[in-house]
Amino acid sequence: MNKTVIMTGFHFPPSALSSGHLRLLAFTKYLPEFGWDPVVLSATPGAYELTDPASVRSIPEKCSVYRAFALDAKRHLAVMGKYPPILALPDRWASWWPAAVWNGLRLIKRHRAQAIWSTFPIMTSHCVAYTLHRLTGIPWIADFRDPVASSTAGKHPMAVRSQSRWERRVLSHAARSVFTTPGAMQWCAELYPEACRAGRLTVIANGYDEEVFADLGRPPPRTGRPLVLLHSGLLYPEGRNPGPFFAALARLRDLGSVTPEILQVVLRASGSVAAYTREIQRLGLGEMVSLLPPIGNHEALLEQAAADGLLLFQGSKFDLQIPAKVYEYLRIGQPIFALVGANGDTATLLRDSGGAELVAADDVDAITTGLSGFLRALTEGTAPTPRSAVVAHYSRRAGSELLASLLDQVCT
């Protein structure tokens, strides 16, 4: 007979804003295979900035989901666009806390739950789980995913101090604190050596869901068409800046190595369209580089599978993080041209899995040389692809098995 875990996660379908709900969704799908039935404690949909009603179909049929009342201080409690910072401690969704604890206590009793799990980056989720843990004594696993510092940049100093205090509290009381990359865990270990010495820190990587790749098919033959390089997802002025790549592309164009008939670059859902359009026009790359709007996740995967090569921008500013799309890229199996921090977790993953050409994200000379060789290998059919045996370790099912093992450990 399976045991029960209460899983507190603010973002859950129909929320359409945070990719973190995909991690929670995967756990709800696969944990029952490994002896644990999840009961999700989430927020009322009115608290979400963006919703996708159709996404509720992705919730497993047998998964129990309960929602506690929540407000967004920025949208619901502001007057003329401003609200007292105290209403957003530790974050804008602190109003969820009381109702979630009330509902959580009822769920623990009703389902005879043996463990609690909570997920970041909404710190209130950890606050709810901490309170439930303190009131019931049930073991608790805190899923940080990324370091707290990555979610507090630019926020009000009161919120930053509050989240820092809660970070220490969570690390002190959770039976395990989970991160998605080794670098993030090491960063935490240096800040909280006592948690590291006690063996309470671990890594469960993000990953891909095998089921969504079942009907992608094979890419079309390239005969008579240009090579297509694709980037899927947001780019930023810092850390994921495509400017050096554009400069390298312009150099190769000036050398006659690439033309619109040879190469097409697609940046899908990049954001900052006006700024990137100006740079593309300034360099005369308008016939070679396209900025396209967002599309659905399945359509995006089909587009990735049809591309000849996949672009990745992940500079050293994000060395402690691995974008969720990297795992999709690896599962797709197409060659990857990665502009990354050489010592970051993303670079380490790509070296281990193979199938990627790695260059420094801000080094135009290195990008020019690397891109030239990458395009030549694509044309000749000699570009390496990711090693499937390594990639298989990052399936969502494998991650769920690791979490089930942790739950078993903390409940013994």
Image (cartoon, grey):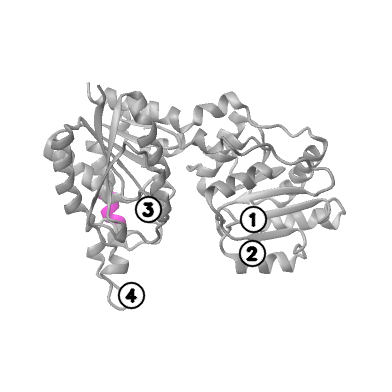
Q: In the rendered image, which quarter contains the C terminus?
A: top left
Task: Select label 3 or label 2 by which is in front.
Answer: 3
Marks 2 and 4 close (CB-CB < 8 Å): no
Residue named by callout 2: 276
Secondary structure at numbered mark 1: strand
Q: Which residue is nearer to you in this view: 100 or 301?
A: 301
Q: Which residues are magenta?
A: 160-165
**Residue positioned 25% across, 41% down in the render:** 170
Q: In the rendered image, which quarter contains the N terminus?
A: top left
Residue 339 seen in the current view: no
* Amino acid at pointer 1: Leu
For disc 2, the neighbor class at 10 Å (few under 14, some 14 to 19, many from 20) is some
* Amino acid at pointer 2: Tyr
Q: Earlier in the sequence, mark 1 or mark 2?
A: 1
Q: Earlier in the sequence, mark 1 or mark 4?
A: 4
**Residue positioned 57% across, 53% down in the render:** 240
Secondary structure at numbered mark 4: loop
Label placed on residue 14: 3
Residue 192 in the image: above or below residue 361? above
Q: Earlier in the sequence, mark 3 or mark 4?
A: 3
The picture quadrant where one finds residue 223 is: top right
Residue furthest to the bottom in view is: 80
For disc 3, the neighbor class at 10 Å (few under 14, some 14 to 19, many from 20) is many
Marks 3 and 1 close (CB-CB < 8 Å): no
* Amino acid at pointer 3: Pro
Secondary structure at numbered mark 3: loop
Residue named by callout 1: 267
Secondary structure at numbered mark 2: helix
